[in-house]
Image (cartoon, rainbow, N blue to C red):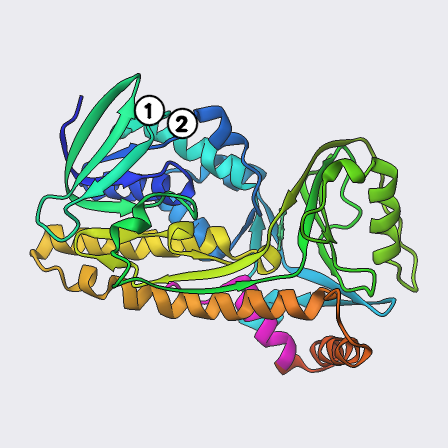
Amino acid sequence: MTVHTTVGIIGGGPAGLLLARMLHNAGIDSVVLESRGRDYVEQRQRAGILEQGTVDALRACGAGDRLDREGIVHAGIELRYDRRSHRIDFPSLTGGRSVTVYAQTEVVKDLIALQLREGGPLLFEAPVHAVEGAGTDRPVIRYTHEGREHTLGCDWVAGCDGFHGVAKHAVPDGVRTVFERAYPYSWLGVLADAPPSSDELIYAHSERGFALFSMRSPAVSRLYLQVPNGTDPADWPDERIWDELEARSAVDRDWTLHRGPITAKSVLPMRSHVTEPMRHGRVLLAGDAAHIVPPTGAKGLNLAAADVIVLAQAFDHLKRTGSTELLDAYSATCLRRVWRAEHFSGFMTTTLHTDPGQSPFDSRLQISQLDRIATSPHAAAELAENYAGLPVV
Ligand code: PHB
């Protein structure tokens, strides 16, 4: 078993896997340690809206073949509110940009297959207990695998182990500042064997609460309903879900909601969170380990990809020039983009959801804001640029 590597990567989700691929291409060795099993990682449902920069990074590291065949380019989204519908056209508002719909589960499957075929070690069911020596030249990762304790010595550690991971605790409490916002609602997310009811995603504002109509394939819909925190999915039989989706998307034109058997149901919390700085000594945090956005802007995966693109460039720069200048700038470089996405995701969330205690005044303000987006190309462009994605650096 490898006992030393250049970059020890904690977490085999999209951030850790993409980083491993980019390092591999740059001739830099790494080891990926994932606490869960392969099946779990490959089935984890997340938004699958890929910005162009994310698509480019996946292609560049060899994970673009199936994405290019099966990913669907979406040139816009629909906003629904007040029984009206308004389409936001991305290319005309952003100088030609679009997004690609390709589920995160598929991104992860492609990256895992590639890494196992032609990459460095990727260990599943290898939980990390501790990261030690972040402030030294030789940090170590302590983990368990196949019933044994192991120690991996590293030049650098990349913490890609998500919000509940251990990596962020390598940044001492006195150094770490946490910024957080909680929301008074969650999402009930379902998968249904029903063809999508629209070619593009629909974000629906309603006084009954928010609803989102997304998709996984021409035969599978991915749908979300705003629900109170603490909701038990068992309280939502299929009929109730479909009726509520229909009520929240009511519009003064022809539109049919395609119903079908619901195959999965779960409740997702909504939160905004940033941990600063994203680097301490030789430990660098990326993706959900450092920041969480509510899913309304579909930014989570793209932010994680942007972090590791910056990180891989910094490691490549170190290898070629011996200079740590890009690694030294890593946290500040990423945080600029992170805070932009936090703002946009928070804006989409608070504009489209109905707070339990919301006053009629606040509801009117939301409608006014949505109207502004529907009638002003400037306001629409602000949404489109953020949604389709800003340049990585
Ligand atoms: C999804 O398809 O799961 C999805 C899409 C867009 C979002 C959130 C989730 O904003």
Answer with left or right where residue 312 lies relative to residue 342: left
Q: Residue at x 76, y 35 (%)?
A: 234
Mark 1 = which residue?
117
The answer to if 387 sits in the magenta stretch is yes
Q: Is residue 292 above or below residue 390?
A: above
Q: Position of residue 174 (x, y in %)?
A: 26, 63
Ligand 1 near label 2 (Cβ, under 8 Å)? no
Task: Work out which quarter of the rendered image holds the N terminus and state it.
Answer: top left
Mark 2: which secondary structure?
A: helix
Q: Which mark is residue 113?
A: 2
Q: Residue at x 36, y 26 (%)?
A: 124
Q: Position of residue 293 (x, y in %)?
A: 51, 58
- Measure how far apart labels 1 and 2 are at the Cα level: 6 Å
Q: Amino acid at mark 2?
A: Ala
Q: Position of residue 120 (x, y in %)?
A: 24, 30
Mark yes or no: residue 273 visible. Answer: yes
Task: Work out which quarter of the rendered image holds the C terminus and state it.
Answer: bottom left
Q: Position of residue 145 (x, y in %)?
A: 29, 22
Q: Is residue 321 above or below residue 38?
A: below
Q: Nearer the viewer, residue 228 or 138?
A: 228
The total number of labels drawn is: 2
Answer with left or right where residue 362 lies relative to residue 167: right
Q: Nearer the viewer, residue 16 or 50?
A: 16
Q: Main secondary structure of the magenta part?
A: helix
- Where, by quadrant of the figure, is residue 211 drawn? bottom right
Q: Which residues are magenta?
A: 379-393
Q: Residue at x 72, y 40 (%)?
A: 232
Tell me the crowding category of disc 2: few under 14, some 14 to 19, or many 20 or more residues within 10 angstroms, Cα based: few
Is there a contact, CB below 8 Å, between mark 1 and mark 2? yes
